[in-house]
Image (tube, grey):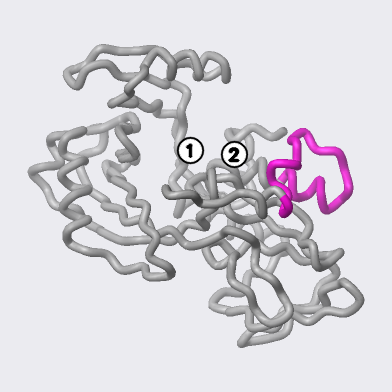
């Protein structure tokens, strides 16, 4: 299976654009059972060590890496176009047509798109049903509000994480702070109370943030799924339709492995990954419970 480092390097080579992959490491605070966390890391071949800091014991993970999401997407887009792909934007799907168990076309506001095979990867909208096409099970939008700060480059050179809150530094001095988990439907609005709460929590991890205001506050919609487990499978209603969605908080992280599993399924090849946890039927058996 392709390593993430090589995957990003290939995209950068194809596109000529830098996605800012950075093995900066991550420090985790607020662990109730640091020794258990250390044992888990060791069992998964993840280098880790405990440290004693001003905020008590922490776990240091030196091999954790990040990539700058918007720049990765921009590089991917350019690579697809250079390789002969066509990307249509702002093109809402209205219906699907089919015949004898095979999808024939997707009908949109702008055009009708016909193909031999289709892949549905519609993110937070994957659970919606349109005429002729059943939505994927147990996928729903989960809003996440985030803040962006601008400091001098080098002020923070590692990811900080505590109790679900993370600070991600960029090489140019920007620091990303997030993120909330809100079951708010397709509402992407933000609110002052959440902004203030995220800012206060971020200041606890990096006190210098208390003296400046964020340069941006926005919200996005995740393709939420129970237990963060995506659906990567053939659609049960069609022979030529495949689904790759529901990655929740790990879409960027799981992208290359998900794509490899999807291609293996489409081509009928054995996969390096066990496909069973990602089957449509498995998704039907999962439920949300009481937490996000």
Corner quadrant of residue 254: top right
Front residue of this view, candidates 78 and 183: 183
**Residue 130 position (above or below residue 80):** below
Corner quadrant of residue 121: bottom right
**Residue 99 position (above or below residue 154):** below
Contact (Cβ within 8 Å) of mark 2 with mark 1 = yes
- SS assignment at label 2: helix
**Residue 105 position (above or below residue 39):** below
Q: Residues within 10 Å of mark 1 (few under 14, many from 20)?
A: some
Please give the name of the residue rendered at 17% of the width and 61% of the height, measured from the top-left corner: 192
Q: Is residue 117 magenta?
A: no
Which residue position holds label 1?
21
- SS assignment at label 1: loop
Q: Residues within 10 Å of mark 2 (few under 14, many from 20)?
A: some
**Residue 70 position (above or below residue 66):** below
Say whether residue 168 is visible: no
Residue 153, position as x, y percentages in the image:
25, 37
Residue 23, position as x, y percentages in the image:
45, 29
- The residues bearing labels 2 and 1 have C-alpha atoms spaced at a distance of 9 Å
Q: Is residue 186 left or right of residue 124?
A: left
Q: Over which residues does the magenta segment extend?
A: 260-281
């Amino acid at each position: 299976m392709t390593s993430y480092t090589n995957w990003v390097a290939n995209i950068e080579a194809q596109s000529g654009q830098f996605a800012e992959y950075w093995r900066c490491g991550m420090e985790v605070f607020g662990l109730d059972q640091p020794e258990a966390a250390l044992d888990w890391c060791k069992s998964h071949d993840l280098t880790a060590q405990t440290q004693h800091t001003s905020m008590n014991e922490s776990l240091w993970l030196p091999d954790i890496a990040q990539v700058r999401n918007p720049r990765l997407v921009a590089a991917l887009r350019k690579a697809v176009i250079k390789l002969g792909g066509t990307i249509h934007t702002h093109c809402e799907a209205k219906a699907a047509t089919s015949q004898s168990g095979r999808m024939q076309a997707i009908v949109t506001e702008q055009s009708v798109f016909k193909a031999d095979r289709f892949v549905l990867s519609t993110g937070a909208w994957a659970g919606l049903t349109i005429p002729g096409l059943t939505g994927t099970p147990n996928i729903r939008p989960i809003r996440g509000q985030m803040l962006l700060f601008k400091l001098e480059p080098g002020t923070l050179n590692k990811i900080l994480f505590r109790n679900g809150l993370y600070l991600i530094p960029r090489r140019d001095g920007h620091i990303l702070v997030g993120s909330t988990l809100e079951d708010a439907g397709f509402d992407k609005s933000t609110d002052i109370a959440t902004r203030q709460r995220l800012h206060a929590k971020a200041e606890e991890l990096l006190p210098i943030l208390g003296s400046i205001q964020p340069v941006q506050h926005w919200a996005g919609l995740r393709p939420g799924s129970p237990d963060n487990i995506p659906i990567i499978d053939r659609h049960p209603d069609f022979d030529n339709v495949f689904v790759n969605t529901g990655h929740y908080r790990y879409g960027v992280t799981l992208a290359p492995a998900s794509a490899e599993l999807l291609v293996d399924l489409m081509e009928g090849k054995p996969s390096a990954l066990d496909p069973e946890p990602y089957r449509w039927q498995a998704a039907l058996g999962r439920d949300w419970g009481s937490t996000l």
